[in-house]
């Protein structure tokens, strides 16, 4: 059984069809990429899977259970975590608090227990703190744990957002342009990090990326969207030589 | 977890004890005027700190605190008035049963005030949190007015525009400051817990908060209801301080005053809310000085009534120009900070 099974989802905004009849089956531990020119509907696909949009048509199943139409926070709790294209950290919280907050949805204490600091909450808070510290070590941010998240350089903010997503305990990680704005050496580090995290946390990764070198190197499978429609899928090698993909990116070849 | 945790706790306890001792001195040797101002300050601290939880911490621009203060005032006043007093007050229409016959101790009436206000906030929350931003402000503003208008028209419950008179003056310095300290302690604890962190996350970025699994709706609801509880209690204390309440006390101006306090103190800072509550409540009185005739040696200024409001507005304008984030921004007082400033206690 596929971990995530997306069948025939379509997203219409009024008369505009942003995504048309999109299918996807993710197996456990795969790294799959979603590419396509700007405005092809990639982020819309993410937003539907993560619960930000309700697909106009089609079904989304995660671990066999339908999740289409459920709220974003419920889908996160079910095990799908995401990062955003434009980094969205909690600006006035410290680095470690940004990660600790990912554990909040899993604590059992009520607000009364938390306010009165009952023993169970204290244990849970300790667990949150230790877990967050471990994740920061994993992404190499343990030395800036006490700093404000916005004071970090761009590449580190990206890593922090990944750590925050991991704190929710996901099985599936959705990364929206994780390498955007990174220089080649940062991109290389990110690639190693994603591979390491997949191994350590038994993750399945679905990512959107424009950096073709990165995508071709990390993804086992690719899907290509253009104007909301899937125009190709296959291994990176197949995609690179697919005439439709070349056409979508470079335009039709003029024959004289 | 925090460095110097034990020391800070001891300092907090010591600070509270010293403060209570000072209150005792003020209570025994201060004038009635001083005590009255101290009581007012305590009540406004309760109202401002709880208002800050929903507006400053959770970032939901509610304009309904006057509704909760009104509900709290009426609930607790109706519960402490004796059946006899109610019979005398309700001259147009008699008070409805069972309100007409119950009388409870003050503390019970205060808790009831909090619970009724919280219950109302909970019910209000369902429609209110379907909206955001400006729309939320307008919806809550509407609810605030609705409560006042209801208070004006339910003759047999609130005695309408006549209001309630002869409420026992139970609120003394210990009740007022006792509840103020409890409010600061509990709301401060809540803000520092992971629930408070989640509320802040809702303020900074709602989409991202949902992405980390936070149920934004229930966290807003939690902040709103908790805030209403303490505003209800504050209303109960207020009713038993001024001993006469009527709907005109709970117009939008009450909300407006509280809003000034939390904005001037710094939206999102409990410390700021406390400092501003003190400054605004005490300052409003202190500025009366400017309404008296003055002799500057070379010129005689006659007393101008209303002058203090001009100066008060001027000070607010200055705060907004030079401290756009309010006095404290989103910073909080901490013993670590104080010790660092004083250069003691090593580790920070």
Image (cartoon, rainbow, N blue to C red):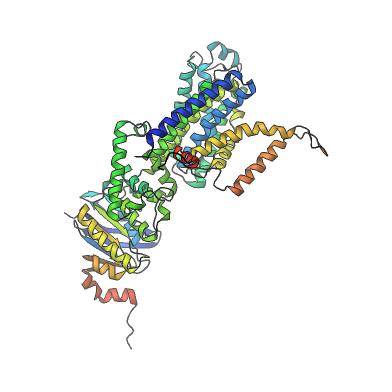
**Callout count:** 0
Quadrant holding the C terminus of chain B: top left
Q: Seen in the image, is B81 located left or right of residue A13?
A: right
Q: Is residue B47 left or right of residue A11?
A: right
- Say if A25 sits above or below B319 in the image: below
Can residue B47 be seen by looking at this rendering? Answer: yes
Q: Is residue B213 at all visible to an observer of this figure?
A: no
Residue B347 image point, x, y percent = 40, 42
| The N terminus of chain B - image quarter | top left
**Quadrant of the rendered image containing residue B166:** top right
Q: Nearer the viewer, residue A34 or A200?
A: A200
Whether A155 is drawn above or below A51: the answer is below
Residue A253 location in percent, x, y? 32, 82
Q: Residue at x 36, y 61 (%)?
A: A155
Q: Is residue A149 left or right of residue A130?
A: right
Position in image of residue A251 (x %, y %): 34, 77
Asked where in the image residue B40 lies, by quadrant, the reply is: top right
């Amino acid at each position: 059984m596929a971990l995530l099974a997306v069948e025939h989802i379509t997203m219409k905004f009024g008369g505009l069809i942003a995504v048309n009849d999109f299918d996807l089956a993710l197996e456990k531990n795969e790294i799959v990429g979603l590419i396509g020119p700007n405005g092809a509907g990639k982020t819309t696909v993410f937003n539907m899977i993560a619960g930000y949009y309700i697909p106009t048509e089609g079904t989304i199943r995660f671990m066999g259970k339908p999740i289409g139409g459920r709220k974003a926070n419920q889908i996160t709790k079910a095990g799908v975590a995401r990062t955003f294209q434009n980094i969205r950290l909690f600006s006035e919280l410290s680095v470690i608090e940004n990660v600790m907050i990912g554990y909040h949805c899993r604590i059992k204490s009520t607000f009364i227990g938390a306010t009165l600091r009952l023993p169970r909450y204290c244990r849970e808070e300790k667990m949150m703190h230790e877990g967050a510290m471990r994740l920061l070590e994993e992404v190499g941010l343990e030395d800036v744990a006490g700093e404000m998240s916005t004071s970090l350089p761009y590449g580190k903010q990206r890593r922090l957002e990944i750590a925050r997503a991991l704190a929710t305990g996901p099985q599936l990680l959705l990364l929206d342009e994780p390498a955007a704005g990174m220089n080649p050496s940062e991109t290389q580090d990110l690639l190693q990090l994603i591979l390491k995290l997949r191994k350590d946390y038994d993750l399945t990764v679905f990512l959107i990326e424009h950096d073709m070198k990165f995508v071709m190197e990390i993804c086992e499978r690719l899907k290509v969207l253009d104007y909301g429609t899937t125009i190709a899928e296959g291994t990176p090698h197949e995609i690179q030589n697919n005439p439709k993909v070349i056409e979508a990116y470079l335009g039709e070849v003029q024959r004289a | 977890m925090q460095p110097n945790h034990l020391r800070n706790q001891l300092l907090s306890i010591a600070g509270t004890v010293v403060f209570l001792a000072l209150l005792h001195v003020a209570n025994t040797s201060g004038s009635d005027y001083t005590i009255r101002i101290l009581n007012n300050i305590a009540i406004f601290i309760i109202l401002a700190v709880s208002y800050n939880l929903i507006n400053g911490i959770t970032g939901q621009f509610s304009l309904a605190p006057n509704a909760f203060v009104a509900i709290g005032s009426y609930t607790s006043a109706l519960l402490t008035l004796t059946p006899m007093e109610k019979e005398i007050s309700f001259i147009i229409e008699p008070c409805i049963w069972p309100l007409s016959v119950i009388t409870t101790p003050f503390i019970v009436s205060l808790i009831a005030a909090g619970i009724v206000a919280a219950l109302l906030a909970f019910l209000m929350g369902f429609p209110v949190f379907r909206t955001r931003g400006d729309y939320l402000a307008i919806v809550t503003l509407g609810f605030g007015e609705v409560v006042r208008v209801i208070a004006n028209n339910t003759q047999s419950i609130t005695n309408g525009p006549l209001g309630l008179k002869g409420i026992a003056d139970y609120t003394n310095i210990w009740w007022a400051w006792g509840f103020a300290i409890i409010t600061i302690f509990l709301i401060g604890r809540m803000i520092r817990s992971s629930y408070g962190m989640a509320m802040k996350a809702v303020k900074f970025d709602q989409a991202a908060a949902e992405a980390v699994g936070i149920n934004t709706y229930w966290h807003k609801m939690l902040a709103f209801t908790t805030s209403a509880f303490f505003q209800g209690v504050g209303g109960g204390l207020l009713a038993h301080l001024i001993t006469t309440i009527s709907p005109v006390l709970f117009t939008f101006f009450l909300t407006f005053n509280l809003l000034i306090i939390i904005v001037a103190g710094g939206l999102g800072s409990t410390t700021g809310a406390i400092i501003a509550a003190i400054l605004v409540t005490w300052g409003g009185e202190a500025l009366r000085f400017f309404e008296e005739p003055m002799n500057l040696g070379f010129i005689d200024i006659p007393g101008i009534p209303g002058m203090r409001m001009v100066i008060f507005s001027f000070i607010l304008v200055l705060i907004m120009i030079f401290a756009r984030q309010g006095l404290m921004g989103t910073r909080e007082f901490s013993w670590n900070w104080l010790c660092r400033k004083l250069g003691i206690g090593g580790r920070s």
